[in-house]
Image (spheres, rainbow, N blue to C red):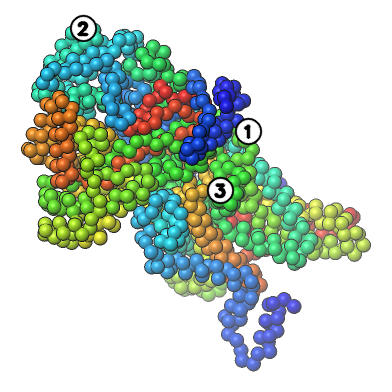
């Protein structure tokens, strides 16, 4: 069966239903193991304006490539900027703006070679100086930006421009995973020398048109894009919706094409073949319970372990995440080391025994929660119920996100948080070192730090993996995070939105706009 | 022979005299509407009264997957956040009824006070009070409610005051008419003549004589309060989630009608039963009052306009 | 009689004026700090000062009211605080949509209710009349959003799926381009107004049928159909004008709930959206508009009743057919 011409408007409706039926038939047949004669995938069509709704915006919206805070910010910067490398499906790293990144023998000097033919939106070619500028900008000691902790040992005064496409970067201490650390599309997009966030210029597939904070921003196709230019003519990111319902209604009414990172509670109400379809990411986000280890009762590792044993992980996933997640095992790594080696199930007897040993039977604690991500508040309530089985009383105190991230952020004795995916060692730099900006558990373990530094200086991947596994063992046996799940992100798309990349970590196929097209 | 005539004939022959109120009640309930009205209303009131105590789960606990289908454990399934629909239904009427009751009491008190003052004081004061209230009457109820909510926000007390303010003008009108009648009576003139202060006259003489119409208006207003407050709850304005509220449940669970309809169907049925029941009762009272020329009997000329103007919302 | 009508009209104007005062007072004067309420989290010294200047919050109250009223009367309804576009432009399409909804409701609902009302009066106390009584009693009791949800449950989601459960169209598209989205909202509103129009018609018709005038006409030996059509109907219909006006007046307020329920892009939904984000100019414009329509229709109803009553009295002693 040949796919009908997608450019004929009159065919649109019939084609859509044919596709829906054919796809369904194809899936059903392949499920039965029969030889399915699925139709060739439809040809992408050039043109159109993709209207994406993302919640969480406000007057503090920004287009700064290295300073974006909210979901809408992230949705925006991905159209304009790109990092040197990127993290892909299955945890593999790929070069993006970098053609290669090589380290010297002991990981103290890295040589970055840039891809040729890359230009910024103003036509200026990508130069090694721009990379140096970006990395220095992010690590400015007077005003460090969000990517700074990830770059850790990088010596910002050691940049050597070898030629237009090559630069050398020195490290204070050996940094074996520098090439992983730079693979952060959220915080480490490359900007040109003299970058002005108000008139942003980047190397991404779209260029800047207009921006109204708290309302919408418009981007148009960059014809000089170094890779295949995007199919879409325009991209509009709308963050003026004040509630999930408003955005969902707008999607139903045809006023927007995508509701990115939609609430999981409604992700299953779509009728298959109806006007709205869902797109699900990999399960990589995590929303842990966070215990402060520098104060009782969580200064006692037995109490921490007991709490981890209380959790019924599948129940939290079913209720709080509507099934959109996989069980977590208190180890935040997904691809590094040996994550599959760590499995934890609920064990109330063991939990009670540990609490008794610690002298904390009938413990009473307060859990601070806020509506900061899908399912967080629900999992707090569910955990409180589960804790009763072990004789623990958990008083859930809900505050607004403003208060949660306000002055007391990082000081709550027992709270929750939410993290997007970072590679393992990068994550440690962000939250488990004494110098980490987000050390919410107040974790200060010299042995742990020493192991971490050793991993950083081990260039051999296999050996490094061994060290990482040791770190993970500490996480698993003594750590202060309870990670009940790894969560998926669900986007709601109009039926005619195609090309959203599968198997990714963020919303909307990691915001890979260049591959998206409108039927 | 009509039912009323038959019962009148019957009572004419009884040896022992039946107290007047019993005769009245029998006449009232002789109307089919009244029995149904009482039954339906009582059924819902029972659910509201007992519900919170027999619910299996707390109405705000997350116990299932969003819009999970009914099971033995959750007979009506789960709502959008995974809470037990049955438990929420059992406690979802409390806010609506208590708000309605409070708003009615406040509205009748406020309206009654204003009506009595206007009727007694007459002249300029009367005009001022009634003209001011007329401005409120110039708005459709929903619009007026929305205007104030948009400005003042919404909390339990605010909504009660708001709905009370919406009812006050009509109550004031009715009470003013009653107060005017009483104020013209001789004993009031006499009291004024011997120098009893106006406030005392109002309280001592006028109030007891308008209690009848006040109570009737109260009943009528209660009916409208329920519909208005259920509507405001539906619009999400009556209170903050997560507490259970039938009106709010309708709104938040609409999106999952195809997955678990019970989260909408049961609350909407309860609202329907309650409002129909209360309406049947007030209708029955209306026609019974006309028959026996009792207080609160709608005048024939007004009945048509009033029905439309005062209808729910 | 002319004096009565003029007085009523004057009272109507005065009422609309008072309505505008109330709307202004409520939205611009009452709440603590209107600017802060609007800006919410985005409030800081600069934005507050700018917004206060934009909203003229520095001038004294009567001056502000004058300025506001003057603007309104010259067609300057202000600028939406959400997207900076003129309120008049935003409201225009919504007015059309609400007009379509209410127009269709009236077009279908009023003749239908009147016809059924007349039928019930003619077959008074028979089975049909009894059944209709019960139906009306139930319909009159339930709030309108309950009727709407009932229809959605039966026709759009749970029982069958013949009709769309929401009545949304892409911006810039006319609601008439997808007529199926109109069915349920109109059906809901028709069911909502049915009890009142039906009852009114039935009662009026019964009054007329029982009147001396009708008795005289029937004593003359006129056939029943002629009695009904030529003598009864014309006199029963005139008070109905009053009912129609009052029905539309009621709908002016009732449309909010139904538009919100169905996501219909009319004035009612516009008001709800504006309230959610505290878009004060939009709130003012829509409330004023709906309240004025309500007042005008009430005045029309009163005027109609003034015009009608004497004729009815005359009709009773009418000799000729």
For marks 1 and 2, give the CA distance. 62 Å
Chain label for disc 3: C
Name the disc covering residue A386, or none: none
In the rendered view, does A364 fall on the left or right side of A383?
Answer: left
Residue at the (42%, 35%) spot, across then down:
A279
Residue B280 in sight in this render: yes
Residue B222 place in picture, x, y as percent: 51, 63
In primary-sequence order, the first of circles 1 and 3 is 3
Q: Splitting the image into 4 quarters, where does residue A438 fall?
A: top left
Residue that protrudes farthest toward the front in the picture: A34
Residue at the (55%, 51%) spot, across then down:
C158
Chain label for disc 2: A
**Is residue A141 or residue A182 the one in the foreground?**
A182
Callouts 2 and 3 close, C-beta under 8 Å: no
Q: Are marks 1 and 2 on the same chain?
A: no
Question: What residue did someone put label 2 on?
Answer: A163
Q: Are marks 1 and 3 on the same chain?
A: yes
Question: What residue did someone put label 1 on?
Answer: C177
For marks 2 and 3, give the CA distance. 66 Å
Query: Which marked residue is nearer to the observer: mark 1 or mark 3?
Result: 3
* Quadrant where the N terminus of chain B is found in the figure: bottom right
Residue at the (19%, 56%) spot, across then down:
A351
Question: What residue did someone put label 3 on?
Answer: C157
């Amino acid at each position: 069966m040949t796919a009908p011409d997608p450019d004929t408007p009159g065919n649109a409706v019939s084609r859509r239903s044919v596709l829906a039926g054919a796809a369904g038939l194809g899936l059903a047949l392949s499920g039965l193991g029969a030889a399915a004669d699925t139709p060739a995938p439809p040809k992408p069509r050039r043109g159109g304006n993709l209207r994406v709704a993302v919640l969480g915006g406000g007057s503090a919206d920004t287009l700064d490539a290295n300073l974006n805070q909210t979901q809408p910010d992230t949705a925006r910067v991905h159209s304009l900027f790109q990092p040197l490398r990127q993290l892909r499906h299955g945890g593999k790293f790929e070069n993006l703006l970098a053609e290669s990144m090589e380290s010297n023998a002991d990981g103290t000097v890295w040589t970055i070679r840039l891809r040729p033919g890359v230009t910024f939106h103003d036509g200026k070619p990508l130069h090694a100086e721009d990379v140096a500028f970006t990395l220095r900008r992010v690590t400015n000691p007077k005003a460090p930006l969000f990517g700074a902790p990830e770059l850790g040992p990088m010596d910002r005064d050691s940049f050597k421009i070898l030629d237009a496409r090559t630069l050398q970067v020195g490290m204070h201490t050996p940094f074996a995973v520098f090439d992983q650390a730079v693979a952060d599309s959220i915080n480490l997009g490359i900007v040109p020398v003299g970058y002005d966030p108000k008139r942003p210029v980047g190397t991404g597939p779209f260029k800047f048109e207009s921006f109204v904070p708290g309302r919408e921003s418009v981007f148009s196709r960059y014809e000089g894009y170094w890779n295949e230019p995007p199919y879409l003519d325009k991209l509009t990111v709308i963050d003026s919706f004040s509630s999930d319902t408003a955005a969902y209604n707008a999607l139903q009414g045809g006023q927007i094409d995508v509701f990115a990172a939609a609430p999981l509670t409604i992700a299953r109400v779509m009728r298959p073949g109806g006007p709205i379809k869902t797109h699900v990411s990999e399960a990589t986000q995590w929303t842990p319970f966070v215990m402060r280890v520098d104060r009782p009762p969580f200064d006692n590792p037995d109490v921490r372990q007991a709490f981890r044993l209380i959790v019924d992980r599948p129940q939290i996933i079913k209720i709080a995440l509507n099934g959109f997640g996989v069980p977590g095992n208190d180890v935040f790594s997904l691809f590094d080391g040996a994550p599959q080696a760590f499995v934890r199930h609920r064990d109330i007897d063991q939990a009670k025994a540990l609490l008794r040993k610690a002298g904390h039977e009938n413990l009473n604690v307060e859990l601070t929660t806020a509506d900061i991500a899908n399912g967080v508040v629900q999992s707090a309530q569910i955990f409180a119920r589960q804790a009763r089985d072990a004789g623990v009383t958990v008083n859930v105190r809900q505050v607004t996100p403003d208060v949660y991230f306000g002055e007391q952020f990082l000081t709550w004795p027992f709270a929750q948080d939410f993290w997007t995916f970072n590679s393992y060692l990068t994550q440690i730099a962000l939250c488990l070192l004494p110098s980490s900006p987000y050390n919410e558990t107040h974790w200060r373990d010299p042995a742990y730090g020493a192991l971490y530094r050793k991993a950083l200086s081990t260039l051999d991947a296999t050996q490094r993996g061994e060290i990482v596994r040791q770190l993970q063992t500490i996480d698993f046996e003594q750590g202060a995070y309870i990670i009940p799940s790894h969560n998926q992100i669900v986007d709601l798309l109009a039926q005619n939105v195609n090309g959203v990349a599968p198997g990714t970590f963020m919303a909307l196929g990691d915001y890979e706009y260049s591959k998206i097209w409108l039927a | 022979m009509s039912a009323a005539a038959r019962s009148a004939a019957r009572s004419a022959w009884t040896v022992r005299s039946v107290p007047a109120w019993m005769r009245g009640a029998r006449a009232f309930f002789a109307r089919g509407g009244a029995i149904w009205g009482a039954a339906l209303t009582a059924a819902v009131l029972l659910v509201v009264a007992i519900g919170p105590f027999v619910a299996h789960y707390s109405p705000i606990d997350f116990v299932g997957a969003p819009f999970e289908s009914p099971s033995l454990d959750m007979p009506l399934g789960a709502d959008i956040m995974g809470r037990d629909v049955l438990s929420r239904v059992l406690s979802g009427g409390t806010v609506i009824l208590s708000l309605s009751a409070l708003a009615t009491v406040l509205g009748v008190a406020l309206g009654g006070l204003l009506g009595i003052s206007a009727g007694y004081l007459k002249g300029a004061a009367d005009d001022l009070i009634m003209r001011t209230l007329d401005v409120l009457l110039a708005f459709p109820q929903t619009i007026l409610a929305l205007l104030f909510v948009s400005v003042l926000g919404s909390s339990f007390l605010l909504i009660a005051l708001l709905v009370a303010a919406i009812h006050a003008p009509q109550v004031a009108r009715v009470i003013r008419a009653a107060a005017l009648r009483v104020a013209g009576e001789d004993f009031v003139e006499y009291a004024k003549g011997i120098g009893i202060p106006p406030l005392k006259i109002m309280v001592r003489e006028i109030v007891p004589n308008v209690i009848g119409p006040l109570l009737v208006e109260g009943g009528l207003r209660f009916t409208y309060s329920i519909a208005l407050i259920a509507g405001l709850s539906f619009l999400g304005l009556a209170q903050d989630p997560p507490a259970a509220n039938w009106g709010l449940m309708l709104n938040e669970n609409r999106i999952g009608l195809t997955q678990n309809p019970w989260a909408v169907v049961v609350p909407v049925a309860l609202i329907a039963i309650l409002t129909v029941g209360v309406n049947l009762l007030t209708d029955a009272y209306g026609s019974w009052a006309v028959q026996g020329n009792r207080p609160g009997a709608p005048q024939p000329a007004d009945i048509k306009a009033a029905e439309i103007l005062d209808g729910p919302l | 009689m002319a004096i009565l009508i003029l007085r009523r009209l004057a009272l109507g104007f005065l009422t609309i004026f008072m309505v505008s005062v109330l709307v202004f007072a409520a939205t611009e004067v009452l709440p603590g700090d209107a600017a802060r309420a609007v800006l919410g989290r985005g409030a800081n010294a600069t934005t507050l000062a700018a917004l206060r200047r934009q909203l003229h919050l520095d001038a004294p109250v009567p001056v502000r009211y004058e300025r506001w009223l003057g603007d309104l009367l010259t067609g300057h309804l202000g600028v939406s605080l959400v997207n900076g576009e003129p309120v008049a432009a935003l409201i225009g399409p919504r007015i059309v949509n609400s007009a379509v909804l209410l127009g269709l409701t009236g077009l279908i609902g009023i003749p239908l209710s009147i016809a059924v009302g007349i039928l019930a009066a003619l077959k008074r106390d028979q089975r049909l009349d009894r059944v209709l009584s019960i139906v009306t009693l139930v319909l009159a009791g339930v709030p309108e959003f309950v009727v709407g949800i009932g229809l959605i449950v039966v026709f759009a989601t749970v029982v069958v799926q013949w009709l769309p459960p929401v009545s949304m169209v892409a911006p810039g598209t006319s609601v008439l381009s997808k007529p199926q989205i109109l069915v349920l909202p109109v059906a809901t509103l028709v069911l909502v107004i049915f009890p009142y129009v039906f009852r009114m018609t039935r009662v009026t018709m019964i009054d007329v049928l029982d009147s001396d005038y009708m008795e005289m006409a029937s004593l003359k030996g006129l056939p029943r159909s002629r009695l009904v059509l030529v003598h009864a109907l014309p006199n029963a219909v005139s008070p109905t004008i009053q009912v129609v006006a009052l029905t539309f007046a009621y709908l002016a307020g009732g449309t909010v709930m139904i538009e919100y329920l169905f996501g219909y892009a009319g004035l009612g939904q516009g008001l709800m959206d504006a309230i959610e984000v505290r878009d004060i100019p939009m709130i003012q414009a829509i409330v004023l508009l709906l309240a004025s329509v309500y007042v005008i229709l009430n005045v029309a109803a009163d005027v109609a009743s003034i015009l009608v009553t004497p004729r009815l009295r005359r009709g009773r002693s009418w000799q000729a057919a």
